[in-house]
Image (spheres, grey):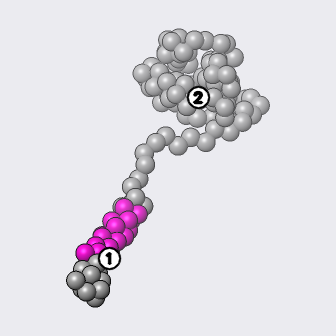
Amino acid sequence: MSRRSRHREADESEVNMTPMLDVVFIMLIFFIVTASFVKESGLDTNRPDTAPETKSEKATILVEISESNRITINRREVDIRAVRPNIERLHAEKPQAPVAIRAHRGSDNGVLVDIMDASREAGVNPSIAE
């Protein structure tokens, strides 16, 4: 075998990588484009720092969540399991009083959602107070 024939055989036995790279780049573009259209779902909450109480809040049922996830309803500390009965009782006493939830920025979102659910189960739509 001559030197030229060995050189041709080596050239012919190499794998052409160009089509594979084209496919990889097309897949990359496809995933980037589809990822930009995926919409994530979630609960968007902006919780401000606690502000001093005003006169208009006295007529509301105020539920506060501290940074350590302690729950108070109208300045009285309650357990998470007692939120719904307390809201039902206070709403029966003041049917026009709305429920306002004030959560500290460092509190858990799960506690906030649990309180909102308990308020809805009690028949009152809550609002997040600033």
Amino acid on which the number 2 mark rests in the picture: Asp
Residue 36 is one of the magenta-drawn residues: no
Residue 80 visible, this orientation: yes
Mark 1 burial class by Cα count in 10 Å: few <14, some 14-19, many 20+: few
What distance separates the C-alpha of mark 1 from that of mark 2? Answer: 52 Å
Quarter of the image for residue 14 reads: bottom left
Classify residue 70 as left or right of residue 87: right
* Residue lying at 24% horizontally and 80% vertically, measured from the top left: 9
Q: Residue furthest front?
A: 1
Please name the residue that numbered disc 1 is placed on: 18
Residue for point 62% across, 18% down: 71
Disc 2: which residue: 108
Mark 2 secondary-structure assignment:
loop
Which callout, 1 or 2, points at the residue further toward the start of the chain?
1
How many numbered badges does the structure rendering display?
Answer: 2
Front-most of residues 94 and 65 = 65
Q: Quadrant of the N terminus?
A: bottom left
Q: Amino acid at mark 1?
A: Thr
Q: Residue furthest right?
A: 52
Is residue 31 highlighted in magenta?
Answer: yes
The magenta-colored residue range is 13-33
